[in-house]
Image (spheres, rainbow, N blue to C red):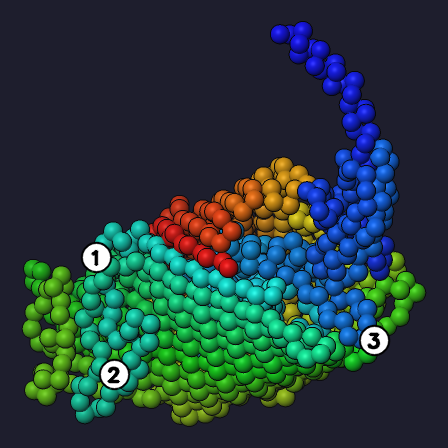
Amino acid sequence: MCEKKSLFFLLLMSFSPFIFAQNGSISGKIIDAQNQEPLIGASVVLNGTTIGNSTNLDGNYNLQNIRPGTYALTVSYISYQTTMEENIVVEADKTTSLTIPLKPADFTLTEMEVVARANRESETILLMEQRKALIATQAVSAREMSRKGVSNAESAVTKVSGISKQNGVKNVFVRGLGDRYNNTTLNGFPIPSEDPEYKNIALDFFGTDVIQSIGVSKVFNSSLAGDVGGAVIDITSKELVGDEAFSVEFSGGVNTSAIQNPYFVQDGTDYFGLANRTRPSTDNFNFNNSLDPSQIMPVNHSVSISGGKSFKIGDASNPLSFYVVGSHNKSYSAVMDEIVRNTVVDGTVWQDQLGRKYSNTTNQLILGNAQYEFNQHRLVYNILVLHTNNQYVGEYTGINGEKHQDDPDRYLGFLRRQQTNDNALIVNQLSTEWQLNNKAKLNAGISHNNVTGSEPDRRENYLTKGSGEFYFFTGSDRQKRFYSLLQENDFNLKLNLTYDLNDKFDSKKSNFNVGYNGRYVLDNFDALEYVFTAVGGQYQADDLHLDAAYNQQNYSESRFSMKKGYNNKYRVTKLINSPFAEVNYQLASKLTANAGLKVDLVNLNLDYDIEILPAGKVGINNKLYLLPSVNLKYDVNSKNSIRMGLSKTYTLPQSKEISPYQYVNISFTSQGDRNIKPSESYNVDLKWDYYLSPAEIITVNGFYKHILNPIGRIDGASSGGFLTYKNIAEFATVAGAELEIRKDIFNFSGSAKDKSNKLSAGLNASYIYSNLLLQAINTPPRNVQLEGASPFIINFDIAYNYIHDYINITNSLVFNYFSDRIHTIGAQGYKNIMESGAPTLDFVSLSKINQHLTIKLKASNLLNSTLQLTRENSDGTRNEILSQFQKGINVSLGLVYDL
């Protein structure tokens, strides 16, 4: 037997030269048609065969074992036009050499050519755009969000280096700078906040089903907003990719804390999250909503449908496309055994409660996108309708007194809080891209945003502990119902004229931009509170029926009285005119520069009519800001780039921060300062990018910020016990370093396009140093960090991808950690409130089982870390826990059908 095998092997070796001599090969290089640089990772496929390959780090490819004949070769690459080379002759035992140039997708061939557009939902395409950009940017694609199990824009941006989320605070911190220092846009247009307490709209408003990509610009130039210090976060909404699309997705899941216990929801909101906003008259107890919550089964569920189609119009076959997304989502969560505690300066506790909180979110959205292209012109219309309802029922037992005013032992009892935030956003955007001639291009756009932020019928009921298991209603206006409404109209206009310049390198990168951004915002806010006297009698907290006490009959019988509070109002008008000019120029073969100047003329006026002060007006009038910026990019070689950015920006106080109105949140009361000043920021950034391959990168980034008149929230020992906003120092310093790595651990994909076996990992980490010398009334100066600035932030993910024919499986683990940070800066004897660092771990599995069906499995917050706020007492002898809870683990299973 062994002899037969040996004989066969010898015969095979003897004939193999003759066998393989019958075949030939094709090799060469794929290059950029404009600058002749090699293109890494371009796809090269021999038509009519299974032979294909990708170019290496030098742009070279090699196709072997090709039978003699005449062939066509198709070459494709992200952001470039696909090219087909025909009549390629392959001869036996010979290599055909062929260098193929690719033209960028925006490279104009003729007057009538329609520009090809890259699919910006791809991680690789966004990385390519990042590589080509003169100014340092970062982006998260829709595919990356899907792979990491991200459900909304807020979760997505926290995967970017230097960005973190603070519990109990909406939106994110960028390089230690919170909401007021950041700026949110949609398709390049500003969008306002739905909450009077915040500058930016809640990023969790935007689910992944409407997001194509999210760009994060932490380095600034003249065309970006001037009112920024941390980052401009731009959400790009989805559009049609290809000729047609249709997809439907269903999912269901549970939160472990919610499903293991009886779950309660408040009355007054229907299945779709539409709240009853009707306010009662003063002569009747005609509230439409019950004070008693009801019990349900808390099963998370969602449905999403999307689709689109393109058409050819007229003799020129101009493309017209439509894309629509509609979705409905409902999610439930619960916090059991939540600690809520507060102290005065010496550590004396005035609030010490243990409770449970049932939260649920309902949202719907409709996204519409229409595009028409003709004669190198592009017209785009976007409409976005978002509705979100967030509500919770909280029940707490223990001490809840009044800060500095009451004996806390008098307020041992029970509290039920019920709150709804019913918010809606309607966005209309119209933009154009006009190629005026072979050198000039005009981009223009207008948008209108309408925001309604409603807090209808917040209900608070306090009961004091009596004898045994019995309670009685607390007096002193401790029975309350609260209504507020924010209505905002936001108008935006932008113009940008780009004129291409010649340079001696013929780089096609030099140009001059001149433009204008205008924004006019009109806010109207009003708030009204109703307070009630206590109804007599004894009650049990475990079987409490509030409607039996507070109803029309008892009101008519004068068992309690109702007082309508003052209708607090304020009106805000903001007008910002922003002309700008900048030049991009290729200074040397490897050096490109951007220099610009933006001029912002700001008018911000707030008229208030509130209970605690006579009606008045406060504002910032005709404030002029000159905002220069310089950005440099040096391409060391095809794989290494160094970028530097210098800029000046400013930060306006939020409307709430200059208003004397006392905004009563469910967990704190805050009041603005009419004398607060805008901040000014001087920014320096230095970044190095090393591109290992089209999908792999190593980035190191350093930054420094000098902020004049920083604005912060401080906790002072005021008689009302509220938080205030102040210019807390003459200046603040922020500096740090960021590291990002995306690397394939192994990749056995080979040359076949329908096969993949890859393990990849991503890491981004940041160190942030922040310091200011605190200046506050009755507070000795001391050095503190910025509120919300975590010194260390780490994000890590590892993903395995297997593809065979239509089967496509991706399993990912995503880890996040932030170190201890200041939640609220202490003043007037108070120490800082600290938020303890906490890790999170998520698992995501996406399994495409055939050409149309995909199964999604997601388990988030697997570690279920304890989230905690603490504060030292004045003499530093102990740390008092102010808040402590766990969110529970979320598990969901979904099914996606794609046409």
Q: Residue at x 83, y 75 (%)?
A: 438
Residue 186 spot, x, y in % from top left: 57, 72
Name the residue nearer the viewer: 344 or 763. 763
Q: Amino acid at mark 1?
A: Pro
Q: Amino acid at mark 3?
A: Lys
* Label 3 packing within 10 angstroms: few (<14), some (14-19), many (20+): few
Q: Are marks 3 and 1 in contact (CB under 8 Å)?
A: no
Q: Residue at x 29, y 53 (%)?
A: 257
Q: Residue at x 48, y 69 (%)?
A: 325
Q: Nearer the viewer, mark 2 or mark 1?
A: 1
Image quarter for residue 183? bottom right
CA gap, disc 2 and disc 3: 64 Å
Mark 2, residue position: 530
Q: Are marks 2 and 3 in contact (CB under 8 Å)?
A: no
Q: Earlier in the sequence, mark 2 or mark 3?
A: 3
Mark 1, residue position: 262
Query: What element does badge 1 sit on?
Result: loop
Tag shown at residue 439 = 3
* Label 2 packing within 10 angstroms: few (<14), some (14-19), many (20+): some
> Residue 330 vs residue 378: left or right?
left
Q: Nearer the viewer, mark 3 or mark 1?
A: 3
Query: What element does badge 3 sit on?
Result: loop
Q: Amino acid at mark 2?
A: Tyr
Give the tally of numbered discs: 3
Name the residue nearer the viewer: 787 or 39. 39
Residue 212 spot, x, y in % from top left: 57, 64
* Label 1 packing within 10 angstroms: few (<14), some (14-19), many (20+): few
Residue 575 spot, x, y in % from top left: 59, 86
CA gap, disc 2 and disc 1: 30 Å
Residue 90 spot, x, y in % from top left: 83, 41
